[in-house]
Image (spheres, rainbow, N blue to C red):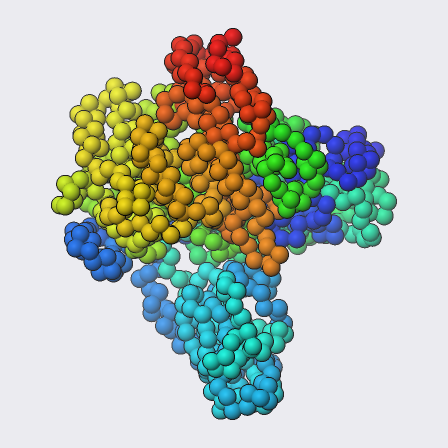
Amino acid sequence: MLHPRLILLLLVSWLTAGTCVGQDQSLRLWYTKPAEKWTDALPLGNGRLGAMVFGGVEQERIQFNEGTLWTGRPRAYARPGAAQYLPQIRQLLAAGKQAEAEALAAQHFMGQQDHEETYKAEQAAWLRQAQAVTVAQATVASNTWKPLTLNMPNGWESAGLGLEGMDGVVWFKTTFELPAAWAGKTLTLSLGRIRDADVTFVNGQQVGTDEGISKKRRYQVPAAVLRPGRNELAIQVINYYDKGGLIGVKEKQPVFVVYSEGADPATGVPLNPAWQFWVQDDKPPLFPSYQASYQPFGDVLLDFAQTGAVTYYQRQLDISSAMALTHYKQNGVAFIREYFASAPRNAIVSRLSAGENGRISLNARLQSPHKNQKIYRLDDHTLALAVQVRDGVLRGVSYLRVKTKGGKVTVTDNQIQIVGADEATLYLTAATNFKNYQDVSADPEKLAAQALRNVSGKSYEALEKEHVRDYQALFNTYSVDLGHTPNERLPTDERIKQFSPTADPALLALYQQYGRYLMISSSRQGGPAANLQGLWNESLTPSWGSKYTTNINLEMNYWPADLLNLSACAAPLYQLINEAAQAGQVTAKEHYNARGWVLHHNTDIWRGTAPINASNHGIWVTGGAWLSQHIWERYQFTHDRDFLRQQYPIMKQAATFFVDFLVKDPRTNWLISTPSNSPEHGGLVAGPTMDHQLIRELFRNTAAAAQVLGTDADFRQTLQEKASQLAPNQIGKHGQLQEWLEDKDDPADTHRHVSHLWGVFPGTDITWNDPQLMQAARTSLTQRGDEGTGWSLAWKVNLWARFKDGDHALRILEKLLSPADNATGSEQGGVYRNLFDAHPPFQIDGNFGGAAGMGEMLLQSHAGYLDLLPALPTAWPTGEVRGLRARGGFVVSLKWQQGKLQQVEIQSEAGQECVVKYGGKELRFTTKKGKVYKLTGDLKLN
């Protein structure tokens, strides 16, 4: 018999064919066709397991991750003896010799890379072998040449060629026709950028070779090499690591063309689009890596036996219950699939139902992009997948179990076959051998089996009820209503296309709540912290390793945690901070001969803290200072002294590092941070403004924490003295807040980072107590412009909120919700169809930063009082928000109409004095812990 819930859902759907399935639409993403690419799919997660549900009809794909599957291994990251070069680097910077300082630091000061000791010899031997293959040998027909359409801007790994995660040597070949009028002329062959190296041949003759991903290949082809009519082009591409291939160019200029030397490339002849490729070698030596990369685990593929036309198709994600749903009719029969990721049971659960008994027939398979994998039958109802990462010590096991009502189940070593079932429930578990950043002795088979036992004995209904109760305990602590319009009834992808703040204010409310949904789904007690992509990643070579970038991105991930009433979700962040603090003590000693701990601009699951990548941006010393701010902020929001007492040593040791590290600038006698960097901008320098803001705030916060705890009186005094000696914020010749010690800012510079504005947000080093500095900071933000990558836009939303310019903040939000997918096929900052933030590519920080920015527009508490509706835009004339948290231990609810505050409700959770400001009025009153206080719009207590 058909489940009553299914009957109701389908009935409502068919009666309202053009709209989303029944109930409240304000907390649903929904679509009228399956996902075409990964950023169309809908995310589920329980803080450990993540899944992307595509909603296909003939084939369903559920791509999944396990949060501890990374490359790499426990190892030493700091470079022994680096500190001996610190004085010389500082001297060079003081003398204005930046290039020399960067060169010395690159040679002796960067962290250790995995495989660096053996790589050069191994690479040389491998290259000799690869280059021994001639173009004639490569292009013979007996090699396995495969056709392709050349479209690999993100490397051959994501081009659908079966080369996921592959490094090595690949040949590409095609042809071009030589116009008769060009006979006897030298041509230019434009290939754009190639990763990493290439050797290019025309008609068997080498015409060029180069190396470097930023170089645009344009090779001269001598007339003597050319033939009348058809000419053969062959390119040997050598990829050492990360992404490989003919990646073209981002600029709008012709590539994959030949043209007469000196002529306009637009007049060129395009290369034949019928390319072919042949993999010569896929086993290069492991490339030296500073840090590890987050990895995908695999896919569940469901191949359905049904065929025929599909009607009433819809897929959706209900973020009020963290449930995904796909339903449609095929050959007159209704089909529905339900999905959720259970945190209590650490499993992904899916139920498949139909409008008639016996209609569920499918083959369920597991697959993985990892080459080292094994798929096998575990028992009569369970299929298993075992994987081992290529470059590292971690391995994982996943179990897929099926339970049916009726029908027949057959499990082989490569699939689960279900025939004629009334209903099927699938349970997916996964685990790795990761125990902690120093220990990989866990038993994944045991862990995955235990999780499977935990779900197998429960009915689907019981598991769903438990899941919803667990999820809503977090999600239902907050609500927001910004108004409603007819656009709210459109599919989500259409809403994004048509979005404007006035046409669809509810999309902004959904966007903010979606940020909270993503936080609950990607960051839970006992799991890893949310990384650059939260919990979701399909690539073996994700952008920036999908790790933890600590010069903005990791911190932005957790901006909404306290403000938007999800403090419990930040537990993994504090575990990361504690582990990084342990590892960072070694880096502090080896690189700076200092006490305490230091963290540079990235870390990974193994808690690397040393400088990485390049000396012009990798030597940035204030990651520990920024993360320590989160500890103090948590105390400010909760007044949890036990938490502060536990975490205070982390703050103290971060501050101790800077007590040792800071040096006096001989020109000004100020204490400065050197060497360092204003994140990813301006190279290696002495005295970047952001550093001094971070360190000053760290000193003040640590001293305040010590006073709260009644400890370290002498150390408090030291910190207060050092804070007063730090280089101050300075106003430059353009009226701007200086980014560096020197007044050298370019007012035309629109760099994505706005690091010197950290003191405005998320810091409190610059507030309205100093209007002149606030104006200078505002000038800097105006000069940076309103464009940016996804996370950069999100930061600007928060900054404009702190400047109390709600309309400008909303203009940035509008850009943040612009479609990331252009009509041309390229991508831009904004959101994908599933509301994932686009850097591009996908980075989750913009989702979290944008959600926090909306909260800052409605309530601020960093200045010692509750500032109500400080940046309310005119496009939000009426609205209501419940459950915002404020410093001082308050939970605040607000209601406004026609742009004016109407009602305020404040719950005191710490019994602190409460100061409220709105519309030029101020109210100050004492509170009792647990009591709720109601105020009118003109700040009178009811």
Q: Is residue 3 left or right of residue 638?
A: right
Q: Nearer the viewer, residue 79 or 380?
A: 79
Q: Quadrant of residue 795?
A: top left
| Residue drawn at x 62%, y 56% as measured from the top left | 823
| Residue drawn at x 58%, y 62% as measured from the top left | 159
Image location (x, y in percent) of residue 267? 56, 77
Q: Nearer the viewer, residue 817 or 469?
A: 817
| Residue drawn at x 66%, y 50% as measured from the top left | 35
Image location (x, y in percent) of residue 858? 49, 27
Residue 254 drawn above or below residue 763: below
Q: Nearer the viewer, residue 773 or 474?
A: 773
Q: Is residue 497 left or right of residue 619?
A: right
Q: Residue furthest front?
A: 734
Q: Quadrant of residue 720?
A: top left
Image location (x, y in percent) of residue 116? 33, 61
Q: Residue furthest top?
A: 942
Q: Quadrant of the N terminus?
A: top right
| Residue drawn at x 36%, y 25% as measured from the top left | 863
Image location (x, y in percent) of residue 502? 61, 36
- Taking the image as drawn, is residue 438 in sight? no
- Taking the image as drawn, is residue 769 in sight? yes
